[in-house]
Image (cartoon, rainbow, N blue to C red):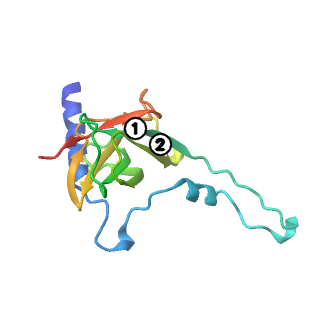
Amino acid sequence: MIRRLMLIVVAALLVAACVPITAPDAESTIPVPTLAAQEEATEEPADAETGGETEEIVQPSGVLTGTVTHLQRSALPPGSVIDVQLQDVSRADAAAQVIAGQTITTTGETMPIPFTLIYDPAQIDPRNTYALRARITLDGQLQWINTEHTGVLTRGAPMTGVEVIVQPVR
């Protein structure tokens, strides 16, 4: 039973990996939250009734940290694009839902490459299963991808120090 469930999860991840994350036009790009955007979203403009004071609204945010690496631990060619996504992979009959993502363009760094994903904790259901997906492309061509389930956030899975291992695409 567990083996069958794992096969379904792996199949769902592979199908999700085939779905493009951007369309040819710039308006269809999936927004990637940044720390600066998160900080800007927590401030409200000054109000004339309060004497110009600003009231800070604290919005809850979750942080998921880790590294993307491969077993060779060599440098990536400059211009390589690493795309890391936090996905809800709970439904075997549907594509994974992207909760958060980060895109990193390298300048020749050596693996591992650190990432930080900022997500809204309200989108996390403790009954669901969440995983990370990592892809590395060069000149638009897929070069590396994680082939194993990297569970995070729920069911005792980690939130920090997560290592996502990518394999070369043949």
**Residue 6 figure quarter:** top left
93 sits to left or right of 156: left
- Secondary-structure class at tag 2: loop
- Place of residue 78 in the rendered image (x, y in percent of width and height, measured from the top left): 31, 55
Q: Amino acid at mark 2?
A: Ile
Q: Amino acid at mark 1?
A: Asn
Q: Looking at the rendering, in which quadrant would you find the N terminus?
A: top left
Residue receiving disc 1: 128
- Place of residue 39 in the rendered image (x, y in percent of width and height, measured from the top left): 62, 55
Q: Mark on residue 164?
A: none
Q: CA distance from mark 1 to mark 2?
A: 8 Å
Most foreground residue, 116 or 95: 116
144 sits to left or right of 49: left
- Place of residue 45 in the rendered image (x, y in percent of width and height, measured from the top left): 73, 67
Most foreground residue, 12 or 80: 80
Question: Could you tell me if residue 1 is visible in this image?
Answer: no
Callouts 1 and 2 close, C-beta under 8 Å: yes
30 sits to left or right of 139: right
Residue receiving disc 2: 124
- Secondary-structure class at tag 1: loop
- Place of residue 139 in the rendered image (x, y in percent of width and height, measured from the top left): 23, 62
Q: Residues within 10 Å of mark 1 (few under 14, many from 20)?
A: few
